Image (tube, coloured by chain):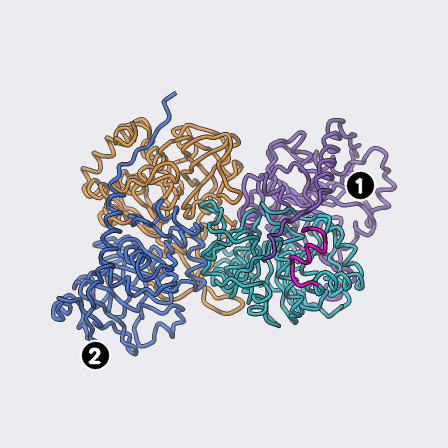
Chain colours: A orange, B cyan, C blue, D purple
Amino acid sequence: MELLPLTEAIAAYVKDGQTVALEGFTHLIPFAAGHEIIRQGRRKLHLVRMTPDLVYDQLIGMGCAERLTFSWGGNPGVGSLHRLRDAVERGWPQPLALTEFTHAEMAVAYQAGASGLTCALMPHHATTDLEAVPGAPVKMLRCPFSGAPLTAVPALIPDVTLLHAQQVDAAGNVLFRGIVGAAKEAAMAARCVLVTVEERVARLNADLNALVLPAAVISAVSIVPGGAYPSYAQGYYPRDNGFYLAWDQIARDRKTFTAWMERHVLGVRDHATLLRTLGVAA
Amino acid sequence: MELLPLTEAIAAYVKDGQTVALEGFTHLIPFAAGHEIIRQGRRKLHLVRMTPDLVYDQLIGMGCAERLTFSWGGNPGVGSLHRLRDAVERGWPQPLALTEFTHAEMAVAYQAGASGLTCALMPHHATTDLEAVPGAPVKMLRCPFSGAPLTAVPALIPDVTLLHAQQVDAAGNVLFRGIVGAAKEAAMAARCVLVTVEERVARLNADLNALVLPAAVISAVSIVPGGAYPSYAQGYYPRDNGFYLAWDQIARDRKTFTAWMERHVLGVRDHATLLRTLGVAA
Amino acid sequence: MMTVTAARQLRNGAVCFVGIGLPSAACNLARLTHAPDLLLIYESGTVGTRPVVLPLSIGDGELAETATCIVPLPEVFAHYLQRGRVDVGFLGAAQIDRFGNLNSTVIGDYSHPSVRLPGAGGAPEIATYAREVLVIMKQTPRSFVERLDFRTSCGYLGGGGERAASGCPGGGPKAVITDFGVLRPHPDTQELELAALYPGASLAAARAATGWALKVAADLESVPLPEPEVLAALRDLNARTERAHAAPIHITLPLAP
Amino acid sequence: MMTVTAARQLRNGAVCFVGIGLPSAACNLARLTHAPDLLLIYESGTVGTRPVVLPLSIGDGELAETATCIVPLPEVFAHYLQRGRVDVGFLGAAQIDRFGNLNSTVIGDYSHPSVRLPGAGGAPEIATYAREVLVIMKQTPRSFVERLDFRTSCGYLGGGGERAASGCPGGGPKAVITDFGVLRPHPDTQELELAALYPGASLAAARAATGWALKVAADLESVPLPEPEVLAALRDLNARTERAHAAPIHITLPLAP
């Protein structure tokens, strides 16, 4: 683990054409890291994430991605991700290939990757057309004991998994507290793990059974207070539900979207400046 | 979830011939529950446990078991389980059939059971004779994506899983704190879950990401302070390493073993009396 | 009215797998009124959560802070849904057919969709494993369709016992709650039939809002008006929620070095 | 001497999968002397533990309290070993052969053993996945055998590259530390050869304690005596451990009702 400014961490570890997962389920979504990827103009990324959320709408709309692996692509509690839709429906700013799972499939795909496996199993029930779409990732097989039909789900192994967390300690261990989604599995599956955190502390405020990623599995940590905004960090700040509602209008139109991104992401130096510009931080 | 005295919980839920798992890895081993099974004279049990430890030595030596599924059967840091060996090597007090896994296999066998699956996968490497012994539980197959060889491990689904934990709250939720082994997976795999706890509290002393089993997955909870002794309960009492060392002598000989069990298990009413007899509790 | 009607379907003590929006409102209304011991599981991993205000997203901090426990997301699906521990699952969709099959993936062809919908999420597994499913959807000819563009999640497949015969473990949609009333599956054919109408809703309008020839149950019921205390609880819940969501976010940054 | 020699094999910063007994002592001695940043993982699920006293069992409370984190046991094997995150694994056994294959299952026939040993535990996966394996065993003709009664865990299989050719990901036994000295695999044949002797240990005695015709490396070394500060650290560790383990257990029961 090395402690790096976010600009240097992204420059050093995230490359064009890589398979990149930004995880965190509603909570602890690494927005600052996503924005830095946009600022540095990464291209042809294969983006992986269970719930693309606004940060992937932004990455897709800014032309960073050529493929998306996901299981639910909406603005939670609000509606569509308009940039995702525009890319899929009309190829703007470029076509976006999809690899589509269910949540449960994608969870075991990360688990398989985290466990050094090439695939994972689920019980198979012929209930969804998803398994039959062009390029469907899953295959069927039979349990060698019971003969029951099983779905084999190929392992997901990101080149880089990016996460946001609450704290890093002096030794580089990182604490995640609250809703964790599939963050641990996405991290353990990845070839390289980058983490942004709210703060650096001498000693983690961690329970015996807390979710802590040891420094040994992390490539770099960057200290980015507010780095999950407009998502949230339990114990630090709540989700900005108003921003998620407002995004629906911003992203609906290519021009307002581009203008917003130019002003608030490309046009600012870092995440702290974005937060000040939005009036969220003083 | 119902709150029951341990005698009633065992009488109501543990039956002759069942597949029964007492889990807890070194920590939180449900000794009191195991002793109550012995007192109530259960027979022909299929005992399941990663590390049989002393409590299974006692159950086996008292003739409760006809099969053992396990992955490491020793007295940790001390040596053999003499009663387990006597049953396997010389059929005393009765023969004991073995189903033998590695730790990693048994862990995924519980995970499969906990996940409603008939089997789990591991990468296969032809490195051990275990996969070729008579009655070996695993089978080989190939990854439908990569063609890589895989080991299929059949799911473990205990009729009853018995655990020890620190606390139960007013609603019947149970807190496990510290080393948890495969306790969660063994519980979620089982048809019925019984838990003994150190104490009942109004509200669990639990972190957001603590391991808590919700009341809805538990059949009965019994309050048995010291119920893990001579194993330990983090935050309550340490492991009695001296007892584990002493057990080596007690269990080495059929007569000293039988005498010890008659005096300390069959001859006492409950676990509190055992603890007082041993001078561990006042 | 949809919220209240959905809440009424829930028996106390049930384990509910909750989606965001109307299902979340219905579950919490039930919990605050007749079913205090509902166990609410959100797919974000919060188990036994008792939110004071309604979450906008499925993973709001409110859900974490009031939960019995938070489990990693893979376990919510594996240990609860797949293992058969969920009594009631909620689903919505863009399209539903007469057998309760649902589409939340695409309108049009999968490879060239006219509308790309959010996708499956947890729906296929909820539909497959929950002991019973409650569907909540507004009833329009565009959403209640003769033929789905895409089957994301199953209801009764082709009806007539096809679902059970396929080995699908859950029980399928027990009720579809719409803005006109409640549809329930016929016991034999499993075709959805209008089983109850809200006071003031007309049979003709319900039929017109359905893309297939909607059948009506022999004993069409009228949904009772919400009890005043239930309405009051719902108003309180919504008011608390609005106040909470209106609070501005403020993040304190450390001073620049 | 075995403990000190084993400790010397560990480079600072390595991720070690630790067994109980001598490996645990060696790892902690290394951590307290030349390798403060060893990451110690015990199969009980404690990761990054820094015990002040040595545990008797693999899951003592001491390991939990001083750990960076505690993970469920399945993850220790899946996320660390299988995923290839472990640099060094330790193994012992009842029998070892000339290619470092190990038996900890049975003496005699599997179905009718003369001695039933504890069994596999985590050994097969440690042997398979760790980048390198250190074996610690007393050298006797009964334990260093021409032919294993049972192969629980692999060394180099039949030698001569068979292990790597089989696709086995880890690197195999790098050293076998005995009470005579250190055996290492020949680079080509992978047969274990005596590579170093302790001061005072004789080559003849080491050969007599081996059940096969033990070869000797061309450059047989002498293991240096333990540095005084290392010996002092080991004595301190052992003394602390004895004091801690001698403390009587007392459990406070609630008053009878």
Alpha-carbon distance for marks 2 and 1? 88 Å
Query: In terms of secondary structure, where does tag 2 sit?
Result: strand
Instruction: Find the magenta span and give its range.
Output: B268-282
The chain containing the residue under callout 2 comes to C
Q: Residue at x 67, y 51 (%)?
A: B281
**Is residue B240 shown left or right of residue A110?**
right
Q: Which residue is mark 1?
A: D179
Q: Which residue is mark 2?
A: C218
Q: Which one is in front, C112 or D90?
A: D90
Between residue B67 and residue C120, name the one nearer to us: B67
Q: Write down the chain letter for disc 1.
A: D
Look at the numbered disc 1 and give the secondary structure of its residue: loop
Q: Kindly check if marks 2 and 1 are in contact, taking CB atoms under 8 A apart as contact.
A: no
Q: Quadrant of residue C214?
A: bottom left
Camera-nearest residue between A185 and B162:
B162
Pick the residue in front: C184 or A186.
C184
Q: Position of residue C204 (x, y in %)?
A: 11, 70
Does B104 sit left or right of A34 as displayed? right
